[in-house]
Image (cartoon, rainbow, N blue to C red):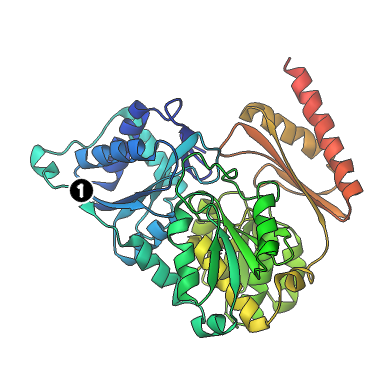
Amino acid sequence: MGRYFGTDGIRGVVNETLTPEFVLKMAQAIGSYFGEGSRVVIGRDSRAGGDMIKSIVIGGLLSAGVKVYDAAYTPTPALQYCVKKEGFDGGVMITASHNPPEYNGIKVIGPDGVEIPREHEDEIEEIYLSSKFRVSSWRSVVNDVVEFRVCNDIYVDGVVKLVDRDLIAKAGFKIVVDPVNSVGALTTPKIAMKLGVKAVVVNGTLDPLFPARNPEPTPETLVETAKLVKDYGAVAGFAHDADADRVIVIGENGVVQWGDRTATLLAYYLKKERGEKGSKVFTAVSSSTMIEDVLRPLGVSVVWLKVGSVDIAHEMKKHQDVLCGFEENGGFMYPPHQYVRDGGMTMALFLEMLARLRAKPSELYGMLPKVYVLKKKYSMDRETALKVVERVKEEFKNERQITVDGVKVISRGYWVLVRPSGTEPLLRVMLEAESESKAREIVERIEKIIGEVAGERT
């Protein structure tokens, strides 16, 4: 991982780590990377500092001779789809995804619509550090920024055409959509409308303070939204993060489902009911191991990768037999559409699944193994977090381990993942067990290690 690019782009606190001076220099590096004459489209979500950062990035791109197209407010997957479909040389998205409100960030998108590979991030960082920027002549910067305000409509149409619109419309669904006061409000209700679905939108205004809930959709942050799903008698609820590349599904019974459970259902549906040809599913070590058991009878195998949608997307692109990819946080990737997380596309596929199977979400999720899920995070720097990981490896040395990202311990009745965050100074612990008591037992062992490591540093 580079100095500035993390798991998914560059992120920092606005006007603290993400200062105007830093943004300008990084924008010049990004513009130098794309090169003079490149066509680059830029967009933003509703986060604080978005206009400031976007304006500075535009200036840096123009300085390098890049032709800039402004998509204004748009979800990340919408911008990515337009980069690929409209033949742009790349894109820049101003967002910090699920991070707290004080954060913002920069994602750099390649011509294939996917965030650029790690080696290209390294290239941009090298330009930044050396200050070897491409500076174009005044004649190259005489063109104005071109307004490109059709990105959202192009994207919505792209999603709708990939599902059975008539089948969904005949079902007469009513849903709840929670775009967390950000740009999902501009596209997801439109997708629902075009599919003949009535959408009740909550937290649908653009507000950088995210007053109703934290930008990360989790069972803890979606309590009120889940209650509304039941109160409105909706068939399901769909809750986004700030840039709408993720969606968490809430069943008609008000139960919030983690993304790997939703992805397991969708992967099974794509293979069994749609008859799609892919035989491999790509996911991160943070996802549940249940998907192996569910998909094995269909001849579908699981490829385990480190956490980060960028790495998953680029690994998927190397293979011909891909069914789908996903992360447990609600990021689902459907290759016939695009090789990136896409909350709107996920919702459309989920609605088609409900309509074709004539089932309620609770019935479908009820077919999956019942497990107790626990997710915790601990504030610490990366060096300390890595020391904890090494101690966990030793503590569980007699169990199966996957070490592509931190360590994932897999044993009878549970699995636990311990890894440093790629976007914040945190240690993340994710656990799935057959019972709450087993989960608590494992967490206590992990927390004992954390306490020992912390004690050594005082």
User: Can I make out residue 365 in this image?
Assistant: yes
Q: Position of residue 326 (x, y in %)?
A: 60, 60
Residue 421 occupies which quadrant of the picture?
A: top right
Determine whether 192 is above or below 76 in the image. Answer: below
Determine whether 380 is above or below 239 in the image. Answer: above
The reply, left or right, for residue 154 in relation to residue 220 is: left
Q: Residue at x 83, y 42 (%)?
A: 397
Q: Position of residue 142 (x, y in %)?
A: 11, 44
Number of numbered discs: 1
Residue 71 occupies which quadrant of the picture?
A: bottom left
On the image, numbered disc 1 is attached to which residue? 145
Q: Residue at x 73, y 57 (%)?
A: 288
Q: Residue furthest right?
A: 437
The reply, left or right, for residue 117 in relation to residue 412 is: left
Quarter of the image where the C terminus is located: top right
Q: Position of residue 232 (x, y in %)?
A: 65, 65
Q: Residue furthest front?
A: 231
Determine whether 421 is above or below 73 in the image. Answer: above
- Closer-to-camera residue (224/301): 224
Determine whether 147 is above or below 165 in the image. Answer: above
Q: Position of residue 115 (x, y in %)?
A: 43, 52
Disc 1 marks which amino acid?
Val
Query: Element type at marker 1?
Result: loop
User: Can I make out residue 317 in this image?
Assistant: no
Residue 390 occupies which quadrant of the picture?
A: top right
Q: Residue furthest top?
A: 458
User: Callout 1: 10 Å neighbours few (<14), some, many (20+)?
Assistant: some
The reply, left or right, for residue 305 in relation to residue 180 is: right
